[in-house]
Image: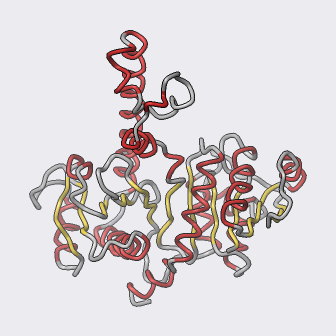
Amino acid sequence: MRIVVDAFGSDACPVPDVEGAVLAARKWGDEILLVGPEERIRAELAKYRTEGLSLRVVHAPEVLTMEDHAEDVRRKTQSSIRVGLQLVQKGEADAFVSAGNTIAVLSGAIFDLRRIPGIHRPALGTLYPLSNRRVLLLDIGATADPRPEYLVQFAQMGAIYVERVWGIANPRVGLLANGEEEEKGTLTLRETHHLLAASGLNFVGNVEPKEVVHGHADVVVTDGFTGNIMLKTTEAAASFAAHLLKSEFWQKPLSKVGLVLMIPGLVLALPGLALLTPAFQRLVRRMDYAEYGGALLLGVEGVVIVGHGRSNAKAIMNAIRQGREAVAAQVLPTIKAGLGV
C-alpha cells in the first residue's frame, strides 16, 4: 500500500513522525510517503537505516500548527496536510495519517477529498480504551453540535466499520446519554433515539458511561463535544489512577506491587517486573493510546487517520496500521455501498 504520513503533525515533529514511518515501512513493507519540508525530513531520515525500505519524501513548504483555523487551512494549499490529502485525492496514495491539528485535518479533508455524497458531517471514531470488549466511540471531535439525522449517519458508518474491519456481525449500536430511558437527555438525544429505533440498525437504546465500560454496545454514538470530553475524562482518570498507584507503591512497595504493574510506562522503569503476567500486560496496552494510534475520520472520500498531538513513534506506526487495515477492508467503498451511494 501507499500511505501518506504528515511528517510535521505531532507536537515533537518530525522526530516521532519519521521514526514511526520507518518502523511501519520495516514491519509491513508498504510505501510510506513523508510529506513536509524536504530538507528537515531527509535530515531526520538520515538517522535510520533505510536500505530496502520504500520511503519517499514529498516536499511541502508550509506547515499547519495547532493555532491555525479553517481559513488558514484554506489559504495554506502547500501545507503538509493539504499536499498529503491531495495525494490521496489524486489516487497517488491509499490513506493519509496525521497527528496534527484535528480541525486542520478535518477542514483539509473536506476541501481536498470532499464528503461522501449524502453525508452531512464527518465523524471521528476511535476504540474506547476502558471497555471490557471492543467499542467504537464516535464522534470524538469532528462535529460538536450535530443534528439528530447526522448522529444516525454516524451510527450507520460506525456499524459498517465495526462489522467490516472488526468482524462483529450485526453490531449493537448505543446512544450515549445520561440515562437508559428513551425520554432522557436533550431534545437532540430524544429525537435521535426515535430515529435510531426506526433505522434498521441493531439499536440497543441509550447507554450510560458505565454501560460503555461494560461493553453493552459495539458502536456508541454521541456528538463530538461530548465524545471528546468523555475520552479526555477517561484519559485523565486513568492518569490519576496511575499516579495514585505509583505513590502507593513507593510508600508500601511490597504490598502494592501487584497494583503498580498495571501502570502504563513503568515496565522499563521499575525492577522486578519480570513477574508481569500476560493479563497485566494486556491492561497496560489497553491504557496506552499508542496501541491504537489514532481515530478514523468517517464520512469523507478517502481513508484519513488522525492521531494524538503527543504521539510517539509507536503511535504513528499504529496509526499507519489503522490506515492500511481500513484500506484492506475496503471501508470507504463498503460505507458508500451501505449508504446506497
Question: In which quarter of the view is residue 340 placed?
Answer: bottom left
Residue ID at (63%, 70%): 95
Residue ID at (17%, 66%): 204
Q: What colour scheme has been applied to the protein in the rendered image?
A: secondary structure
Say whether residue 16 is left or right of residue 52: left
Between 47 and 224, the one nearer to me in the picture: 47
Q: In this rendering, is residue 55 above or below 88?
A: above
Between 29 and 58, the one nearer to me in the picture: 29
Q: In this rendering, is residue 179 above or below 252?
A: below
Say whether residue 42 is left or right of residue 332: right
Q: Position of residue 87 (x, y in %)?
A: 73, 73
Q: Position of residue 215 (x, y in %)?
A: 25, 55
Residue ID at (31%, 64%): 219
Q: Position of residue 237 (x, y in %)?
A: 36, 33
Q: Position of residue 319 (x, y in %)?
A: 58, 58
Q: In this rendering, is residue 321 above or below 283?
A: below
Image quadrant occupied by the C terminus: bottom left
Image quadrant occupied by the N terminus: bottom right
Say whether residue 149 is left or right of residue 112: left
